[in-house]
Amino acid sequence: MRKWQNWERVGLVFWLLTLLTLAITLTINARWLYRWDIQHLELLNYTTLSETELLANFDQLMRYLNRPWIGQLVLPDFPVSASGAFHFFEVKRLFMVNYAVLLISLIPSVLYLRHLIRQKRLWTLIQPFQIAVVVPLIIGVIMAMGFDRFFVAFHGLFFNNDAWIFNPATDPIINVLPETFFLHSFLLFFMLLEVFFILQVLIGKYALRKLK
């Protein structure tokens, strides 16, 4: 029994990591969100580019961030300063860490879920995810109370420099990547995470009803 409990604790950690990195992956690749913000935030007012051209630059940026074999960021219609290039390099590194954690945690997560199904212990998901479901809500409330401070704190946590503070004169791409777009991205991430966590509780409760 103790061996099972230890394995299930480890498996739960891997499953949490899988859900977390999956939510991040879906968020950072939500091209539809940027396309929606082009209209919603009227981003074309801050550039001479058409929507098609702006999306082409966004797609090129995402290709750089997502593909480890692309070593240099070159955008069709935007200059990139040395400081800007360094920040995007650091962002790319975070993307790679996220994908690595997702891949590493995936197999243990599958084994963990298969174990729970075989042992009819899916109900054990209920308690940890009832606790976990509160976390995105708390962070979301804190973020909503002052996104400016949250945004600065986020960069202070993941970056040890101020390269993320772009100068529009040298990196005009920042004009079409406004803070509100990142607010929407964070909201999407927390919503996805909340849905994933709630699903675990519902799955656990369904399994418990079947046992009874």
Image (cartoon, rainbow, N blue to C red):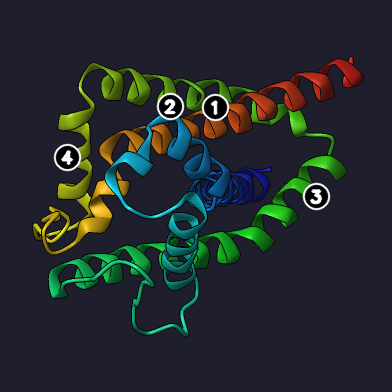
Q: Quick one: quadrant of the N terminus?
A: top right
Which tag, 1 or 4, sits closer to the chain's start?
4
- Say few, some or many: other residues with alpha carbon within 10 Å of mark 4 (under 14 / 14 to 19 / 20 or more): few
- The mark closer to the camera, 3 or 2, is 2
Which tag, 3 or 4, sits closer to the chain's start?
3
* Helix, strand or loop status at disc 4: helix
Relative placement, left or right, of 172 versus 12 is left
Residue picked out by circle 1:
194
Between the C-alphas of marks 3 and 2, the distance is 27 Å
Q: Nearer the viewer, residue 103 or 62?
A: 62
* Helix, strand or loop status at disc 1: helix
Which tag, 3 or 2, sits closer to the chain's start?
3
| Labelled disc at residue 114 | 3
Which tag, 2 or 1, sits closer to the chain's start?
2
Between the C-alphas of marks 2 and 1, the distance is 6 Å
- The mark closer to the camera, 1 or 3, is 1
Q: Amino acid at mark 4?
A: Ala
* Helix, strand or loop status at disc 3: helix
Q: Position of residue 10 (x, y in %)?
A: 56, 51
Which tag, 1 or 3, sits closer to the chain's start?
3
Residue picked out by circle 4:
153
